[in-house]
Amino acid sequence: MKHLELFAGIGGFRRAMDVLTNDHIMDFHCVGYSEIDPKAETTYRVNYIIDKDEIAMGDIVAFTSDKKNIKSLPKFDLLTGGFPCQTFSMMGNQTGFDEDRGQMFFRIMDILMVKKPKCVLLENVKNLWNHDKGRTFARIKSELESIGYHVYADIFNTADFHLPQTRNRILIFATTAKIPRNFQFTAKLIAEEFDKKYKETSLAHYETINEVLKQDVESKYFLSERIKPTLLADGSSKFKSKSDINMKIARPLTATMHKMHRACQDNYYSQDFITSHGKVNPVDTMTKEELAKLPIRKLTPEEAFMLQGFPSEFANNAKSHGVADGSLYKQAGNAVSVNVIYAVLYYLIKCNIIK
C-alpha cells in the first residue's frame, strides 16, 4: 500500500507502517512526506530509508498553493497526518479554525479533493472532539463526507497500547471503501485486538516507566538544587496542583517539556526510584521539602522517544547529526504514538477495510 505522510514530524505513522511491513502484516511504501521544521526533518531523514523518487513536500502551505504540485504527487492509497493541534489544545487559546495553524486541515482537503486516496488517518488532541461545542469536529466530518468519505473517530489513550504514558488523542479514520454494516471503530475494540497480537510484533512495548528509565545518565539531566523546590511545589493560593514525581505511567509528553514545567505537567524521577526499579518510592513517605533534597532528574530525549514507541536509536542518530536535546524533546512531544497507529492499522487490515 502506498502512503503519503503529512505533518510528518519524526514519522510516527511511517514507523508503524515500517513495523507492519517488517512483521509481514502488509507492505507499505511511502511516496512522500511534508515537514516544515528542519530539525524534525533531519531526525526523519537519518532514521528512515528515503527512496530517491520520494517527494519531500516541505511546507504544505506553499506546496498546496499550486495545484500542479498536488497533481504531480504519485498515486497513493493512504494519507496520514497529525495536523497541528495547538489551536485545539486545552493548553492553547483554543481558537481552532480562526488561526492559521487551524487551517492546516484544509490543506489536507486540498490534496484529498485532487488525489482521492481510498483511506485517511488523522490524529489530533482529545479536545478537538468537543472544541467549539463540537462544531469543529462536525465541520471536519462534514468536509470529508462531502467528498465521498465515510468517517469514524474515537479517543485513544497511549497507555492502553503498552506504552506507559497517559496520552489521549483523537484518531479520525475516513475511507471511500464499502463498509460492512457491523464495522465498529472504537478504541476499546482496537485495544482488545492489539492485546492479542502485540507480543508477536516487532514493536517496543513496556508496562511501566521503569522499563524505559536508564540507570545511569549524564549529570545535565538532573535538576539543580535551586529549581527543585519550584518544580515540586503544589502551586500558590491562586493555582493549586498535585506535583508528584515518580509516576509509573508517565504524564503526556509535551512539545515544551524542554522548558521544564512543574511536576504536575512534566515527568521527573528520583534516583532511588530508578535504581530500585520502582520498588522504592520516597513520595510515599517524604514531604516535598525532603524530596527536594534527593537527586531528581527529568527524562532524557532517548527515554521520551521510547515512551512514544520509537527506538532510542532514533534520538541518538539525530544527535549525531547535530539535533540538540531541546529539539528532540519537542519532536517527541509532537509525535504520534507508534503502537497506537500500528494497532489501528492492524485492526483495519484484519477487518478487511485496508487491503
Image (spheres, helix red, strand yellow):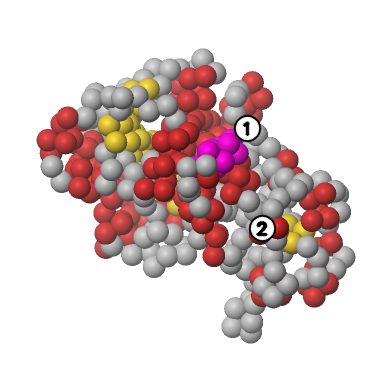
Corner quadrant of residue 309 = top right
Quadrant holding the C terminus: top left
- Relative to 17, residue 146 above or below: below
Q: Is residue 62 left or right of residue 309?
A: left
Which range of residues does the magenta coloring cover? 308-318
Give the main secondary structure, helix, strand or loop, of the magenta stretch: helix
Q: Earlier in the sequence, mark 1 or mark 2?
A: 1
Given the image, on which type of amino acid does mark 1 rest?
Ala
Which element type, helix, strand or loop, lies under badge 2?
helix
Closer to the camera: disc 1 or disc 2? 2
Residue 60: percent from left, percent from top: 26, 45
Residue 5: percent from left, percent from top: 35, 35
Residue 204: percent from left, percent from top: 62, 32
Q: Is residue 124 left or right of residue 205?
A: left
Which element type, helix, strand or loop, lies under badge 1?
loop
What is the crowding at mark 2: few (fewer than 14 residues within 10 Å), some, or many (at least 20)? some
Q: Which residue is mark 2?
A: 221
Q: Is residue 49 visible?
A: yes
Label at residue 327: none
Q: Which residue is mark 1?
A: 204
Corner quadrant of residue 76 = top left
Considering every residue shown, the one lying at the far bottom of the view is 237
